[in-house]
Amino acid sequence: MSNVVISVKDLVKNYGAFEAVKSISFDVYEGEIFGLLGPNGAGKSTTLEIIETLRAKTSGKIIVNNFDIDKEAASIKKIIGVQLQTSGFYPGLNLVELIKLFGGLYNQSVDPIELLKKVNLVDKAKSKVKELSGGQKQRFSIATTLINHPKIIFLDEPTTGLDPQARRNLWDLIKEIRNNGTTVIITTHYMDEAEQLCDRIAIMDEGKIIQLDSPEKMIDDLVANGFERPKQVKAANLEDVFIQLTGRMMRDE
C-alpha cells in the first residue's frame, strides 16, 4: 500500500476573511480506507468537496490518480464515486431504473441486478427509494457510487441514523469494496466506526490537521502518555450485546 492515489499539498480555502482550511497536506494510499475526522466546522467536508471537484480551492496543489485538479478535473470526475450525506433520487423510478439512469449519465454499460447483488438489494429491485429502510437507502446510495467502476469513492457519514445491525452490515460492505481494489475516503462522527474501518485517519480541527496516523498508533501514543480510562474497559460493549441477541442478519423494515 505504497502508491499515493491522492496528494494534497498546502491546501487553503478562504471564504472572505474566514479561513476554512489552513494550508493542510496529506496523502492517501491506493487500496486503503482513509478517514477524515473532526468536529462540525473543522473543514473536513470542505476539504473533501475540493478533492471531489465540487468546490474551488483558494490555493494549494491536489493530484488525484496522477491528474492535476487544476488542469484535469474532468478526468478526476471519471474515476471517483461520491456518496453525499443527502442523496436525491427521482421518486418515481425504482432501483433498476435509477441505476440505468445513472449508467446513462456516466455513459457506462451497467447490469442493475449484478450491482444490486453487491449491496444485497436484489429483492428490492422494483422498489422505489422511499420504500426502503434507512440501511437499505444507504446501501443503495453506495451502490450508485460504484456505477462508473471508480478507483476512489468518498463516503460522507454513511451510517448516520442506522441501527446497530445496519451499521455493522454497512461496515462489511465498505470493507468488501476496499478488498475489491477501490480506495475509500470516509467521514464519520463515530469513533468506533473509524477505529474498525480505517487504516489511517487524519483528525482536523479549526481548519488544520492536528494528527495523522493509524487508529492503533494514535491509541498507543495516548496510553503511552499516561492516559487511563476512568473505569476498566470490558471485553464487550452494549452494542455487542445487542448484536449477539438480535443477530447481524439484514432486515427489511
Image (cartoon, rainbow, N blue to C red):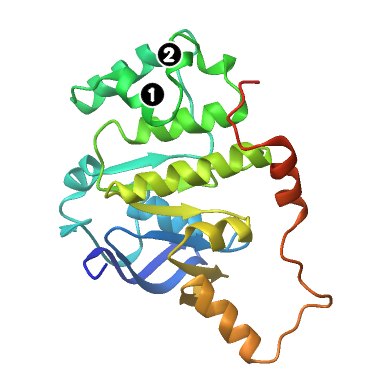
Give coordinates of residue 141: x percent, y percent. 45, 31
Quarter of the picture holding the C terminus: top right
Give coordinates of residue 28: x percent, y percent. 32, 65
Residue 143 picture quarter: top left
Give coordinates of residue 120: x percent, y percent. 45, 27
For mark 2, what is the residue?
A: 125
Disc on the earlier residue, 1 or 2: 1
Give coordinates of residue 71: x percent, y percent. 15, 54
Q: Does the image show residue 30?
A: yes
Residue 244 picture quarter: top right
- Asked which secondary structure carries label 2, the reply is loop
User: Relative to residue 116, is residue 208 drawn left or right?
Assistant: right
Q: Does the residue at mark 1 contact the one at mark 2 (Cβ under 8 Å)?
A: yes
User: Which amino acid, by three-letter code, is at mark 2?
Assistant: Ala
Q: Is residue 25 above or below residue 108?
A: below
- Residue in the picture at 46% in, 53% down: 186
Total number of numbered discs in the rendering: 2
| Of 82 and 19, the residue lying toward us | 82
Q: Is residue 199 above or below residue 84?
A: below
Number of residues whose C-alpha sits closer than 10 Å to that of mark 1, classed few (under 14), some (14–19) or many (20 or more): many
Q: Is residue 188 above or below residue 176?
A: below
Q: Does the image show residue 207?
A: no
Name, please, the residue furthest toward the bottom.
225
Quarter of the picture holding the N terminus: bottom left
| Of 112 and 77, the residue lying toward us | 112
The label on residue 116 is 1
- Asked which secondary structure carries label 1, the reply is helix
- Residue in the picture at 52% in, 33% down: 138
User: Relative to residue 62, is residue 190 drawn left or right?
Assistant: right
